[in-house]
Image (spheres, rainbow, N blue to C red):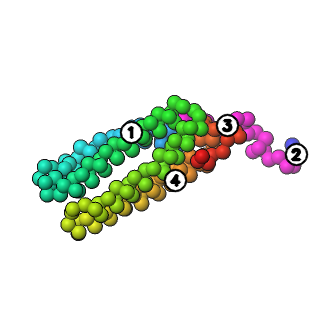
Amino acid sequence: MNQDQTPELKFKPVGSRPRGVGGWLAFFVIGQLVLRPLRTWNELNDPRNLVTPLFETNFPTTANIIGVERALIIGLTAFGIVVGLSLWKVRTPFSAKLTKIFLVVNPIIFLLSAVAFKFSDLPPKAQNEVMQHGLFETGVLTAVCLVWFLYFTKSERVRATYYDEGDSLVLR
């Protein structure tokens, strides 16, 4: 054995990089295909989140904002399902790029949704509470999306599964 070679390098099998939908990648895919839709379904059907006719009469602008917010949440969930299916079934760089777009769009939509309540017809105190809650959720979501974005940028598994050796992992 050459002095420059370590036993670790000598016995490492060729092509041993993680490949395929497994590990953290599988966790992300399951999250988009199963966990997020279940969470969305639960949120949208929670009686505390329903807009009643009385609420709609008293706060019509806020009711409209909530309606748009619900539509956006459903749209983002559908986008997440498309991303999950793409990662699971389509083994091309497009799948990883679509995922990165999804991870950038999510916090932007949540931020816009939180800021929209500034234009609601809620009393100022309630308006501030709703906005603070929305901004906190946006901060948490941004951190989570950033971690996943870095995973899809740096992961050996993602590189081996979705990219050819010569392709870059940057968002193009």
Q: Marks 2 and 3, Cα distance to the nearest angstrom? A: 31 Å
Task: Determine the secondary structure under disc 3.
Answer: loop
Image: 54 above or below 78 = below
Question: Can residue 18 be seen from the camera position used here?
Answer: no
Quadrant in the picture for the N terminus: top right
Image: 63 above or below 166 = below
Q: Position of residue 15 (x, y in %)?
A: 70, 35
Q: Amino acid at mark 2?
A: Asn
Question: Can residue 141 be seen from the camera position used here?
Answer: yes
Q: Marks 1 and 3, Cα distance to the nearest angstrom? A: 28 Å
Residue 147 disc label: 4
Q: Identify the mark nearer the N-term, 1 or 2.
A: 2
Residue 78 disc label: 1
Q: Are marks 4 and 1 in contact (CB under 8 Å)?
A: no
Q: Are marks 3 and 4 in contact (CB under 8 Å)?
A: no
Q: Identify the mark nearer the N-term, 3 or 4.
A: 4
Residue 7 disc label: none
- Magenta residues (range): 3-22
Q: Marks 3 and 4, Cα distance to the nearest angstrom? A: 23 Å
Residue identified by numbered label 3: 164
